[in-house]
Image (cartoon, rainbow, N blue to C red):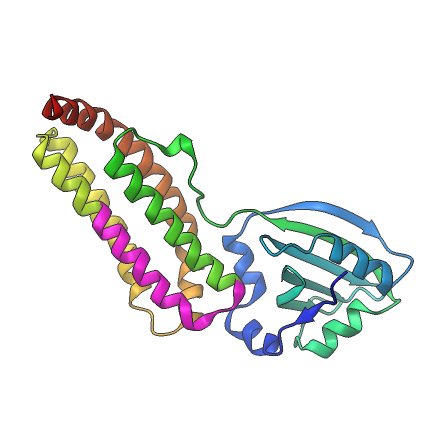
């Protein structure tokens, strides 16, 4: 098993991007829950068992006194963490504190969680059958996920630049849809409704794009996340009706 690596700047990162706030924009599933009697050795074996370079995990560790730590991991690296006293008060996180917990014989319980794929992952069910729209949708989702990945990895310097790519992808997607609607003479009332939703979503993107630093961006993303995720899902359903019209139009144009 690889040795566990802890980010040296984890204390500063935890202040900028608190792990408890990140949980508001992540979906996790428990994969193992065990009561520990063998202390740190067994704990490290269990944690190491799930170490994967391609996935993110959460380890929730509780010692005999009730002190607990939630650790975010990717591969053998602990990326972020948050620790609390038995009374719920927060304990400043640092590498030495985490090492002490990982190697302690005083650990009582360990819960391991897998972080599910962040945001909305593209799947075939989202295909509309209109190639330009399918490519635009897929590109938009992949860029959203890149932003979340940088947040999880604590790559603060990359977050806002990655979001600018998301923003540009969203605008390009909207412009493409509206252009196709005009060319294919989409129902005027439906087009106006569609464009209105585009403007509403762009306003959300504008708020995120206007943030001045990474920690503020993450805070705002957390505040808007549920709305953004549900809005994306709604837009896809709305686009399905549009797609049926466009398919007929484009097929006719290709004859």
Between 5 and 220, the residue placed more toward the observer is: 5
Question: Residue 222 at what x, y percent from top left?
Answer: 45, 58
The span picked out in magenta is 153-173
Question: Residue 42 at what x, y percent from top left?
Answer: 85, 58
Residue drawn at 49 percent across, 50 percent down: 118
User: Can residue 89 be seen here?
Assistant: no
Between 227 and 106, the residue placed more toward the observer is: 106
Q: Main secondary structure of the magenta part?
A: helix
Question: Residue 228 at what x, y percent from top left?
Answer: 37, 49
Q: Quadrant of residue 234?
A: top left
Q: Is residue 32 left or right of residue 183?
A: right
**Magenta region includes residue 166:** yes
Q: How many marks?
A: 0
User: Can residue 137 be seen here?
Assistant: yes
**Residue 16 sits above or below residue 225 on the image:** below
Residue at the limit of the structure toward the front, as seen here:
255
**Magenta region includes residue 77:** no
**Residue 75 sits above or below residue 173 on the image:** below
Q: Is residue 77 left or right of residue 252?
A: right
Residue drawn at 69 percent across, 66 percent down: 88
**Residue 89 sits above or below residue 197 on the image:** below
Quadrant of the snapshot with the N terminus:
bottom right
Question: Residue 154 at what x, y percent from top left?
Answer: 52, 68
Q: Is residue 12 left or right of residue 76?
A: left
Q: Is residue 231 left or right of residue 111?
A: left
Quadrant of the snapshot with the C terminus:
top left
Residue drawn at 75 percent across, 57 percent down: 47
């Amino acid at each position: 098993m690889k040795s566990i690596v802890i980010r040296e700047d984890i204390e500063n990162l935890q202040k900028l991007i608190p792990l408890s706030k990140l949980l508001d924009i992540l979906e996790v599933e428990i994969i193992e829950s065990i009561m520990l009697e063998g202390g740190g050795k067994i704990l490290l074996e269990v944690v190491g068992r799930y170490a994967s370079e391609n996935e993110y995990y959460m380890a929730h560790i509780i010692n005999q006194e009730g002190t607990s730590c939630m650790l975010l991991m990717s591969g053998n690296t602990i990326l972020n963490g948050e620790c609390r006293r038995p009374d719920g008060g927060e304990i400043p996180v640092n590498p030495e504190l985490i090492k002490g917990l990982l190697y302690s014989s005083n650990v009582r319980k360990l819960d391991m969680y897998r972080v599910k794929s962040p945001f909305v992952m593209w799947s075939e069910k989202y295909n509309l059958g209109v190639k330009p729209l399918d490519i635009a949708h897929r590109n938009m989702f992949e860029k959203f996920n890149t932003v979340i990945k940088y947040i999880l990895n604590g790559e603060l310097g990359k977050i806002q630049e990655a979001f600018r790519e998301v923003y540009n992808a969203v605008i390009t997607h909207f412009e493409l849809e509206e252009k196709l609607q005009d060319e294919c003479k989409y129902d005027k009332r439906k087009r106006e409704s569609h464009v209105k939703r585009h403007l509403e979503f762009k306003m959300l993107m504008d708020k995120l794009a206007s943030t001045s630093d990474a920690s503020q961006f993450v805070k705002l993303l957390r505040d808007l996340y549920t709305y953004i995720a549900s809005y994306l899902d709604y837009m896809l359903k709305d686009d399905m009706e549009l797609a049926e019209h466009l398919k007929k139009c484009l097929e006719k144009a290709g004859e």
